Amino acid sequence: MNDDAIIALYEARDEAALVQTQEKFGGYCYTIVYNILGNSQDAEECVNDMLIKLWNAIPPAKPDNLYAYVAATSRNLARNRWTGAHRQRRSSGEAEIALDELVSMPAASDDVEREVDGHALGDALNSFLGTISEEHRKIFVQRYWYFMPVEDIAEDLNITKSKVTVTLMRTRKKLQTYLEQEGYL
């Protein structure tokens, strides 16, 4: 079923929308949240939470790209769950490692400013990603959007783990320079 048909099911409040979403995007979302949470039971619960969130958000939301909307919703739910679970204790999960690598990212002082800065920073990040090679962009996105382990990225792109690690280090340095030039750091 195509995305427009699934959105139409949501708008009609037809529960088949949930089934179709699960069939089309369930495995993809599970991979995203599992890479963040590192636990299969939590990942399954998070995918179910994502379906509920979509049910409550569509309508009024009408995403232009359902694939991206579902992925972002899943990722945000998983990050929120991970953050809540790790406020009191720390672990060595893949998400923590990846986020620690990006620790120099700027923070805003209040919610409104943070939201405005977040959108501008997102635009700057997208612009930066347009300046690097396709391979480096794939490595960066797999690591910092999908929280994939370095080993999995290397396997997926058929390159060495060392190349992934070095590429990530160099790309972070380039990003830092870019953000400094743009006035974010």
Image (cartoon, grey):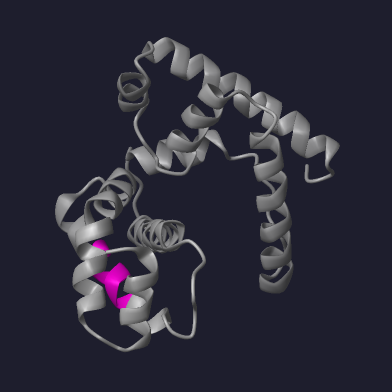
- Does the magenta portion include 51? yes
157 vs 4: above or below: above
Residue visible at 72% across and 46% down? 124
Where does residue 185 sit, x and y in percent of width and height?
Answer: 78, 42
184 vs 23: above or below: above
91 vs 82: above or below: above
Q: How many marks?
A: 0
Which residue appears farthest toward the bottom when viewing the image? 12
102 vs 169: above or below: below
Q: Is residue 81 left or right of residue 138?
A: left
- Does the magenta portion include 155? no
Q: Image quadrant of residue 51? A: bottom left
Residue visible at 32% across and 40% down? 93
Where does residue 14 sit, x and y in percent of width and height?
Answer: 25, 86
Residue visible at 36% across and 19% down? 154
**Front in this rendered view, residue 139 or 41:** 139
Q: Which residues are magenta?
A: 46-53
User: Which quarter of the rendered picture does the N terminus lie within?
Assistant: bottom left
Where does residue 182 sit, x and y in percent of width and height?
Answer: 83, 41
Residue visible at 25% across and 63% down? 47
